[in-house]
Amino acid sequence: MHKLTRLLAATMLVSGLATAAEAKTLVYCAEGSPENFNPQINTTGTSLDAARPAFNQLVQFEPGTTNVVPGLAEKWDVSADGLEVTFHLRKGVKFHSVKGFAPTRDFNADDVLFSFNRQWKDDNPYHKVSGGAYDYFNDMGMPDLIKSIDKVDDYTVKFTLARPEAPFLANLAMDFATILSAEYADAMLKAGTPEQVDQVPVGTGPFSFVAYQKDAVIRYKAFPDYWAGKPKIDDLVFAITKDPTARWAKVQKGECHIMGYPNPADLEAIGKDPNVDLMQQAGLNIGYLAFNVTKKPFDDKRVRLAVTYAIDKDAILKDVYLGAGQPAKNLIPPTIWGYNDKIVDYPHDVEKAKELLKEAGLENGFETDLWWMPVQRPYNPNAKRVAEIMQADLAKLNIKANLVSYEWGEYRKRLQAGEHQMGQLGWTGDNGDPDNFFFLLGCDAARPGGQNLAKWCNKDFDDKLKQARRITDKAERTKLYEEMQVIAHDEVPVFNIAHSVVFEPVRKEVVGYKVSPLGRHEFTDVDLK
Amino acid sequence: MPADTTASAPRVETPPGPIAAFFRDFSENRAALLGLIILSLLVLVAIFANFIAPYGPSEQFREFTRIPPAWVEGGNRAFLLGTDEIGRDMLSRLIFGARLSLFIGLSVVVASMIAGIVLGLVAAFAPGWPSIVIMRAMDVILSVPSLLLAIVIVAIIGPSLTNTIVAITVVYLPNYVRLVRASALSEKTRDYVVAARVAGAGTLRIMFITVLPNCMAPIIVQAALTISNAILEAAALGFLGLGAQPPSPEWGAMLASAREFLQSASWIVTEPGLAILITVLSINLVGDGLRDALDPKMRRS
Amino acid sequence: MDPRFRGDDVGRRKNRLGRHGHTMLGFIIRRTLLVVPTFLAIAFLTFVAIRLVPGDPIEVRTGERGISPERLAEFRHQLGLDQPVWKQFLDYLWQLAHGDFGTSISTHAPVLSEFATLFPATLELAFCAMVFAVVLGIPAGVIAATRRGTFLDYSLMGVALTGFSMPIFWWGLLLILFFSVNLDLTPVSGRIDLLYYFEPVTGFMLIDSLLSDQDGAFLSAVSHLILPTIVLGTIPLATIARMTRSAMLEVLGEDYVRTARAKGLSPFRVVGIHALRNALIPVVTVIGLQVGALMAGAVLTEYIFSWPGIGTWLIESIQRRDYPVLQGGVLLISGIVIVINILVDLLYGVLNPRIRHAR
């Protein structure tokens, strides 16, 4: 009797181990629930991460970099005038099957057309489905940029642009340019449940969707027919755990393999854990303080420079970013190509600042406002504390800075209208193209209501910005961007505060995981030891 | 002293007057006395926070962040209960927090009691639509779970200490209104009220001078309960980030911002919670004692 | 933990029923009719109040990027936000009358279906907490009452009063620190180990895990429930224990109990059958009243344990300015609480023969 139970127990143990060895399950501790599973209509990183395993784009970012590589398009040609981009699509690419839908055909040009037309054309039957907000498509200026999208044949699609735009390819690697299945969409439309397309994803990606339980878990399984070969792990699970301390506890216990957004307070302990690698990378963002150059006294470059010398950037990084940030000397983070590392940041030098103010005739100081946003942002964990430190530093120059803030939506609107003298804000990049940052200092954005908060319009800078947009040669563009960074450094329209540093605890048994400079969490090439 | 004519006030058989009996019963209750002593200490601490606290509640000692309490290894005698994540003295923050918490509790009680008495008396003395409107409004408030109601109110008027008090006052209002109305309705028909009316007293005088004093016993017990619950609820709101905002040393808000240190510096989390527990417990002990002393049934033994 | 319902309400309820309850049927009709204006008032107040919240739901979402005035206007139009508030409210009532609680602004899913997927988690937790509170609270109260004045009585009631005074969010953190972090006995958060996967059938993890027939799934679900149950059950437990004790004391002093004792019935029969049955009447009412308290307590408990229920859902809806969710959620929860309160009133009448005689 005893023997039998022991035997039973042993076999159970063995079979348990065997299944564990057979199926490799990677668990990612996600920070929240997705809004839905269609990257075209979402803007939050959480939602985009959740849907990404199911999908591909025409071109894609090479994991761990911002380089654009072929995706569903094997190759592409750009016409000499830069106005026509022709994509040659990959053949034999399969879509996933889900409950209620089994694809009957491979991926082709119709899917590309559907995916873009849904976002672009008012008359597309899907345009208004699920709220119809295509924020990224619109924010990236696609409606004005695209003149037409044509199907040349089943495997060739031609985009005609209204103007040459070098970052266009990088834009198409973004999540909003995800390719959905037109056949699935038609089927759901016929069934009268078009919203289903956004709730249960069907794509060509490395993992096919299994199930989602709000606030609990998202399950994917490897797609055996994936065009780039079946992923090495078998199951991909997103364990939704909102509390960062709880996420860390799960990683510690091995309930999760990878987590995002650890608590700064836990970083020290995480670094010491022998089972966990603490991976890190500069985030694709910038937190800055803009000087409104249309208002006195910041129309005077010497005043802007004096403030720059006066602020103790290191103190901000130490006390507010708590080590999870790196000082910024340029508007773009160092992970983006075109970063000019030759720039030398202005040091913290109160004497120099006083001298400059004296030159500007303001040795007795002045009164100004200093705006801080009321919310935590990826590039600035606590704008109020930053403002308080700046306020104390400026007081040393007899500058009386009054702290100002508004409700978040209102805050941004007023800043864009140019009501401030000095205002904090920041930017999170989308596609790793320098243009995606530098437009913030261009003349177009300097109009009232535009996103150039310094309201600074420098012709030299703006000419180079526009020229870099027209050419596609990366080396030439790099040169232009490097020159622009020199101009911005000399003219100081903004005080660059910091780029946040992204930390990601990853258990040692995980192989091949790369921290994305785009803030993504990608698992296609990941394996488990 | 018409106290012994009321339904809910102590019914006293023989001499020692009701107040003396109350004090005798209360002081015989050792638990209640203990509660009263702790509570008095807390009140003193709150009043004299400026003199007792070793440091200011927001004073930061940058070199001494997350120092454990003095009796733990690595502790520092200068910071008896340790320091928090940005080097503020825990003891000082807890002392100033006592002031905040008791202030919240007291404000809620005073505000909801006054509003409740007025509305309750109006509902009792003005039958017809004023009564109906008031009582239906109270039904509405009662049908939304208290914390949820407070959360919604604070979400609407914005998170702050004052708004926390407003929200919790609204939440507790129906208790007083119903209590006052019920006792006032039963008092209204008594002989002494009729007598007062015959003697020519106006309605307002009858409401507030004749009837109200005889409804006070249950209101006082309710007040004791409200203080402790208000403190708990304000702390809960602070914990959810919807109450007093940092850097204010409100205990719930302290817990919320310290939550991330649960593993690395647990005293930042345990101390404010303990402070809440001790305060609420002492008030509840006093409240129980009050009720026992005022409740004739419990006095039988 | 809805302190307004911590037991002291019972007497008042008795009054109310006594006053209006000329007949049971009349009472039922009256109570049910009163629900309609109450419900409408809640709908109206949440509706108007929520529109006073600073911050536009669309602008909150757009962040640094902002949104063009034209597109903003278009979205506001789509969501009906450009209409006058009274018109929006009438539309909303019309929708409600058709069982449509609106659509979430952030997920585009119907509020009712989100509620339906999340509510079982809250219900399961609340139910377990209530069972925990009743199973421990009633015996504790009975023991304390029968041993009145002993050390046991004092310690039980001391513990009960401590539980009654507990800031449960802190209590939850302490339990996590001790049992999950230090002793590694219980999981930190969630409803079940991710190893197990099955389609939800009932939405109740305990039942689904049994139905799934997977080894260990049920145990895993139980281990995830333990700490949240304790945390949420603490205040009801303390309330029930205190209420049971005082009700028992009252009953034990009644004539019929003395008579039963005098007749020489065993103490067990006296306490267990004669006294407890009558003492339970107010206790049952308190239990009913705790339902509202549990709903409120669930918000905090879910927040601490990342429990995927309606509490977390509502708190997030505030941060996202997701009006339809906040509004619909508050309405649904109040609706449930109102219905339960009516049932409690009825139950009280059924249980308490004195009230029936009174009519």
Image (tube, rainbow, N blue to C red):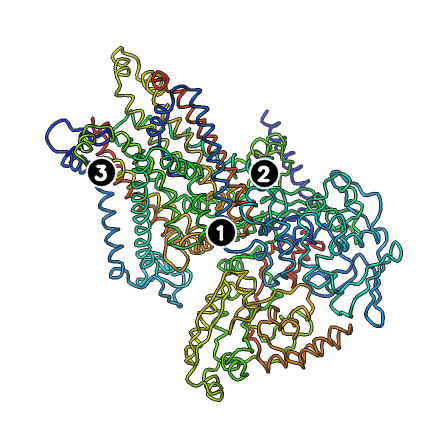
Note whether residue C188 is visible. Answer: no
- Expressed as whole percent of the image width and height from the top left, the position of residue B54 reads 28, 62
| Residue under numbered circle 2 | C94
Q: Is residue C229 left or right of residue C81?
A: left
Q: For the residue labelled by badge 2, is the local secondary structure a helix, a strand or a loop? A: helix
| Residue under numbered circle 1 | C52
Mark 3 or mark 1, whichever is nearer to me: 3
| Residue under numbered circle 3 | B202
Q: Residues within 10 Å of mark 2 (few under 14, many from 20)?
A: few
Residue type pointed to by label 3? Gly
Q: For the residue labelled by badge 3, is the local secondary structure a helix, a strand or a loop? A: loop
Note whether residue A95 is visible. Answer: yes
Disc 1 versus disc 2: distance between alpha carbons? 22 Å
Q: Residues within 10 Å of mark 3 (few under 14, many from 20)?
A: few
Disc 2 versus disc 3: distance between alpha carbons? 48 Å
Looking at the image, is mark 1 or mark 2 earlier in the sequence? Answer: 1
- Expressed as whole percent of the image width and height from the top left, the position of residue B45 reads 25, 54
- Expressed as whole percent of the image width and height from the top left, the position of residue B275 reads 33, 50
Residues A414 and C181: in front is A414
Instruction: Work out whether B296 lies above or below A134.
Output: above
At horizontal 65% and vertical 64% (from top left) the residue drawn is: A517
Q: Label 3: chain? A: B
- Expressed as whole percent of the image width and height from the top left, the position of residue C30 reads 44, 26
Labels 3 and 1 within one chain: no
Tell me the quarter of the picture where residue B202 sits. top left
